[in-house]
Amino acid sequence: MRWRRRHLLWRSWRARHQLNIRMDRTSDITGEPILCFATMRNEITRLPHYLEHYRLIGVSHFLIVDNDSDDGTADYLAQQPDVSIWSTKASYRDSRFGVDWLTFLQMRYGHGAWCLTADADEILTYPHVDTRTLRDLTNWLDQLGVPAFGALMLDMYPKGPLGIQGYQAGADPFETLNWFDVDGYTWEYLDRYRHVSIRGGPRKRVFFQQDPDHAPHLHKVPLVRWNRRFAYVSSTHIALPAHLNGVFDARLDLPTGVFLHSKFLDEVVAKSAEEKIRQQHFTHTDRYGDYYDQLTAGPDLWCPRSVQYQGWQQLEALGMMTRGKWR
């Protein structure tokens, strides 16, 4: 594992040559910041709500890589006073889906700080999110000597066919995507990286029923007290050193959160057709041609077992997140 981590860090250091600074405000990072890292492409509609949400819960500064957007994303981000932005036209897939780029930025700017990695379609919620900030959460984790926080990615979807519900930039996407699956999830402990693998939700139920092992992973370690020797192995699903992956270990009685996933906004139909051609989002692209075709057709993900979203207390009551010892 040590050599694996060194190789990933070397890749990330090399990937710095693919990044061009668009707007560098990192000199504004002071004190004990909470930093948010993301790779984005054509996310102009999600950005107003994304930035508002993370500012509200305590993010100090955003460090974002724009991967060749053509919808105004980079210009919009460059105008934000708490955003530093880099641009690249390099391959998203070849950069391990942006992880190499972000790991370099975390090595350079995140050492010693709490670093959150959250895509534009991932909105983090956690116990007490309405009354406590990320600083409250990370202070508690620091007191216990816990260096990481886990979150389940929860696919949110509308009632009715995808692609017909309108969405206005700046609105809360979960006023439209307000349903989720509460059952059908599998939790499996894997010894190699000492992590719990979670699969399930509407993508497994609808698109991967015949091949459940190909369904997307839903476990994430998105919030870490970073060290320049740390590295993500697969998106934010697995990290090294492996002790960072113990975030879902029930024996530790730790709080966990949920990433509300807004993938299924109305734009998903057009984006799926584009991504099938670009082939940038999966390692084994041959497995996902049918998946993109089905998304392009605008399926209805709702079913009689779907549950309507009501807030973090509901997610805790349903076992989707835990407060643990953090009361």
Image: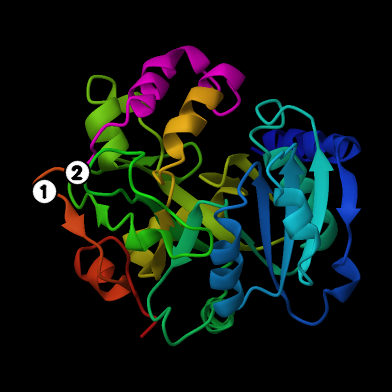
Q: How many C-alpha atoms fall within 10 Å of the one at disc 2: few (<14), some, or many (≥20)?
A: many
Q: Residue at x 42, y 59 (%)?
A: 173
**Residue 173 as seen in the image, left or right of residue 62:** left
Q: Which residues are magenta?
A: 276-301
Where does label 1 land, which residue? 305
Vertical relation: 167 (above or below) 294: below
Mark carried by residue 131: none
Q: Residue at x 61, y 21 (%)?
A: 278
Where does label 2 land, which residue? 302
The one nearer the camera, 118 or 297, is 297
Name which residue type carries label 1: Arg
Q: Position of residue 6 (x, y in %)?
A: 76, 38
Q: SS at mark 1?
A: loop
Q: Position of residue 90 (x, y in %)?
A: 78, 29
Disc 1/disc 2 C-alpha distance (Å) = 8 Å
Q: Position of residue 130 (x, y in %)?
A: 41, 82
